[in-house]
Amino acid sequence: MRASTRVIWTVSVLMLAAVSEAIFPLPFLPFLPGFNHGHGNGAAKAVKPQPAAAVAGKGGRRRGGSMEAQTNWGGKWEIFLQNSGVSGMHAILMPVINKVQYYDATIWRISKIKLPPGVPCHVVDAKTNRIDCWAHSVLIDVNNGAIKPLSLATDTWCSSGGLTKNGTLVSTGGYNGGANTARYLASCDNCVWEEYPQALAAKRWYSTQATLPDGKFFVIGGRDALNYEYIPEEGQNNRKLYDSLLLKQTDDPEENNLYPFVWLNTDGNLFIFANNRSILLSPKTNQVIREFPQLPGGARNYPGSGSSALLPIQLYVKNPKVIPAEVLVCGGTKQDSYYRAGRRTFDPALQDCARIRINSAKPRWKTEMMPTPRVMSDTVILPNGDILLVNGAKRGCSGWGYGKDPAFSPILYKPRAPRAKRFKELQASTIPRMYHSTAIILPDGKVLVGGSNTNDGYKYNVEFPTELRVEKFSPPYLDPALANMRPKIVAAGTPKQVRYGQFFNVKADLNQKGVTKENLKVTMLAPAFTTHSISMNMRMLILGVADVKPAGAGYDIQAVAPPNGNIAPPGYYLLFAVHKGVPSTGEWIQVV
């Protein structure tokens, strides 16, 4: 090749890297402005980020800088529980104890499990001596299925939640007397709910709660609440509200802006999406920093009920000054679907997924099509960075009896695969999971799927009965043929707590040769609070790996903890070692 030709080719590649984030995503960061050679705000220099890209060979293919094991296995469904006691309208995995908290609503005064002996019944009406002895909250052991009923006094119907840095669940809002409530449930076997009915300044029914960089909470929206506030410390009451112009401007006749999507950006600001519009809000100044292009096609928030995820955040041993962040929004409905469903016309759901790079100088939505339309689906980030879309319907919208044509087959979405190869339909369930379904990741890499209640109460002789069965879904990486490729984190050789920016070792047993930092990665996944097709605070970090060395029956991985709370708010995460797309069982680690 002539020297002049080489120069032209090199310049062309650099120009493409600078202007096209879609074509050359992360491997070209060293060529972009703002790439930081050192930690913090040092001078920008071009250095090769870690991990480096791998070259595909036999038995795998390139997957965003690593090799992925190949399988055509479509996953596996199994019944975990025949009766969860409480239909899983809200769900979260409690840290360390590995128990899932399910709760629904107290307004119906019914469930399928009574409060245990010694726990007093709730007094509904002191004048008439009406009492409620049913449990509306349960802790479920994810390993053996043991159920512990808990007492709730305030109504949690359509509420929100998140975990403190110590692993305590903070639940906010709900219905009627529960709408201004903040509730606290610590992560222990014998803990009980503590409830503060006047903690919030506004009634929060269908609101969204988000964790801030310091571990505190922000809550926005809800029916007739076009504002937001900051959740006070336990036992205190908040009285200060901030108006939201975004919610006022997106509040159409069908609402379509309840349960807005809220994601903490890597710069510490909040990406907020409602209906079809989105902004970046500073929680420090309460100013809107930027507005993003409108997402066309229809409504994405309740009752339009699309679903969303902040795609996995790629970190390096030495991070760029601006760490990229990308938001995914999938499915939803036409703007008037709720009105039309009320008149028994059930329109097809939206079939598109759209992504936007929220730290780009010129952000824009890039749309692709799912195999089938979806509304009321749950979005779950898997331990290897893939996305699972599960539950929901193909027609209609959220509401009592407003959804039709169940979406039985989950969809696997590979965000870093070529555009035409990102979606794959997986093995179908036989249980309809419609309105009020939930799905959350478990430490063993399976997905716990529960709930579904399109009825005003617990009803069984209807088109879609109140669902109490709980399933576990095994994604393709749990193909038995890949079992020998699955790492096992050695708990004794891995820390339980790390500081920001700390280099730390993850010890993993793995009987495989040719293991390098190009095909072995470490991920951290924050447990999501899931309800109404929204997974609050779901967050994955792909950590920088400095070195991988053979050790004993496996390898010692030197990883780097997230740099600050903007990237990873303090608290508990599931830590996974992932070899060629096959994850270990997760171990709890606390970022402090």
Image: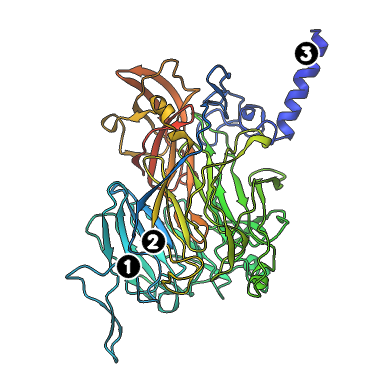
Point 39% across, 76% down: residue: 108
Look at label 2 and name its amino acid: Leu
Residue under label 2, please give it: 468
- N-terminal label among 3 and 1: 3
Look at label 1 and name its amino acid: Lys
Are circles 3 and 2 on residues that touch, CB within 8 Å? no
Q: Is residue 216 visible?
A: yes
What is the C-alpha distance between the residues marked 3 and 1? Answer: 72 Å
Label 3 crowd bin: few (<14), some (14–19), many (20+), radius 10 Å: few
Point 69% across, 69% down: residue: 336
Pinpoint residue 348: horizontal percent, then vertical percent. 67, 59
Residue under label 1, please give it: 112
Pinpoint residue 38: horizontal percent, then vertical percent. 52, 29
- N-terminal label among 2 and 1: 1
- N-terminal label among 3 and 2: 3
What is the C-alpha distance between the residues marked 3 and 2? Answer: 65 Å
Image side of residue 394 versus residue 460, left or right: right
Q: Give the quadrant of the C terminus.
A: top left
State the mark number for residue 6.
3
Look at label 3 and name its amino acid: Arg
- Figure colour scheme: rainbow
Pinpoint residue 452: horizontal percent, then vertical percent. 46, 62
